[in-house]
Amino acid sequence: MQHNAGDSASSMNEQPIGVFDSGIGGLSVVTHILKLLPRENIIYFGDTARVPYGSRSNEIVQTYAVEDAAFLTSKNVKAMVIACNTVSAVGLEKVRAAFSVPVIGVIIPGAQAAARTTKNKKVGVIGTIATIASQSYANAIRLIDPAIEVTSQPCPLFVPLAEEGWTTHKASQLIAEEYLEPLKDAKVDTLVLGCTHYPLLHDIIHKTMGAGVTLVNPGEETVRWTKDFLAQHNLLNKSGQPPRHSFYVSDLPQKFLEVGERFLGMKLENVEKIDI
Amino acid sequence: MQHNAGDSASSMNEQPIGVFDSGIGGLSVVTHILKLLPRENIIYFGDTARVPYGSRSNEIVQTYAVEDAAFLTSKNVKAMVIACNTVSAVGLEKVRAAFSVPVIGVIIPGAQAAARTTKNKKVGVIGTIATIASQSYANAIRLIDPAIEVTSQPCPLFVPLAEEGWTTHKASQLIAEEYLEPLKDAKVDTLVLGCTHYPLLHDIIHKTMGAGVTLVNPGEETVRWTKDFLAQHNLLNKSGQPPRHSFYVSDLPQKFLEVGERFLGMKLENVEKIDI
């Protein structure tokens, strides 16, 4: 872990947690940090100039992810959370190889929660084209319990629907029915929402899948995992100072401010544009 | 116009037409070049690593547009067509200022066709958030004929629907009905399809607007404009050689090859990835 020679253990605890995402969606992970780790300082970076990542090649996603992470390490973070499922699926190892700071992705926490939740050993996974093509969730779930049958489905229209705020529209309902049909046919009892935008469509997905299906939010699970990690490594911030939350984006902040409040559930402040 | 000292007039005529777009959609403009200017060599660049442009700030779109155009000028094009409506709306002047090659955007040709077509002096314009916010079409149409009333509407879900190929889906119909309602209420008799993706949704848009509304495709109009421009400047390729068509993209070509055939209506070849 990088820190200056003069850092004491306590000042290191006060270093921020870094969170990055392809854009706005990672704010849904920040909401859980605010709940579960309310004392922590947070630096968030959303790559809004190059979003979305989920329809791009693994090669480009990896290149962008390493650039995003470089910005966070320049801010001296004590740990880094990759909020973006696509980056966690195809770029986690590249980021880990490039930096010495601990890096936590959303796939393993999400897969563990799914394996723990399912009773009939049938799990569904939805996500971007890149996340589903990587089979990262399916492989992780089968590693935890080879008896689990995983059915995966890319849902590319869910991101623009969530960003448009069409969370209860009849068209969104029709699109959900079409995308989720293979998962209903497979009789999954657990569904991983493998993209930061999908929790915004929770109600439509829940209604379409039926009350017997439990929805797993990997972002929430990842924040629990992060809390355990920081506790185990004696890295929790115990300073008692009011936490600082700083947000950086690569395009002008206007849309981030507008749409971001839907994800964060509160007003966004301290948003700054950087060049990446 | 840039050319080497040794270039004869005839070799300049054989230089390619450059076309750039934020991604795949500009191929719908290429189809019209193939029809109207079948002897011309074409160099196409699609910025697939950073698509879409339509939800980004003007500042970022301008930066990306100048980078895209720099690539085409490095290929020694005799003229440049900006296929992307968003770039034409907010970045045309920046591109013109940066390069000496003639640059043709889609707004003026589209606006002229709309002004020529309308009988009741009520024109609708649909496009990306950035294109509509710029009011470029509305301003251009009113400049041509101040008596024309322009009603504009951003349709951000149309691009992902077209890329998913959901051109006849019931959900697309519902989305079209919602987006187009203000244009029907305004009783427009002419509708500008102000985004390269929208011609793929022609049938649903036509059905929603009704048979009395004429749809204008600015890409097609722009190619007519380009043909006139080249003829007036004695720049048409008269060599009689089989034309060369080269395609460049900034992400791996796989998706471009798959989705691109829907736009081009034929098999794509000679696609190469470059770093931008």
Image (spheres, coloured by chain):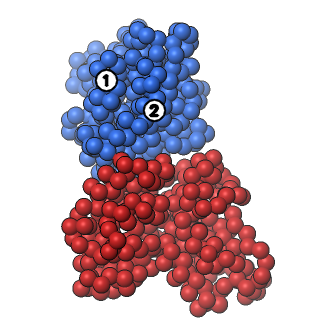
Chain colours: A red, B blue
The image shows residue B251, relative to residue A219, as above or below, that is above
Q: Is residue A67 left or right of residue A43?
A: left
Q: Measure how far apart labels 1 and 2 are at the Cα level.
A: 19 Å
Q: Is residue A241 left or right of residue A167?
A: right
Q: What residue do we see at 38% from left, 66% from top? A: A206
The image shows residue A173, relative to residue B97, as above or below, that is below
For label 2, count other residues whose C-alpha is less than 10 Å away and answer few (under 14), some (14-19) or many (20+).
many
Q: Which chain letter goes with mark 1?
A: B
User: Which amino acid lies under the numbered mark 1 shown in the image of this protein?
Assistant: Gly
The residue that mark 1 highlights is: B210
Instruction: Pick the residue in front: A135 or B11.
Output: A135
Q: Which badge, 1 or 2, comes first in the chain's sequence?
A: 2
Residue B7, position in %: x, y?
41, 20
Instruction: Pick the residue in front: B84 or A74.
Output: B84
Q: Quadrant of residue A108?
A: bottom left
Q: Which mark is drawn over residue A249?
A: none
Q: What residue do we see at 26% from left, 47% from top? A: B258
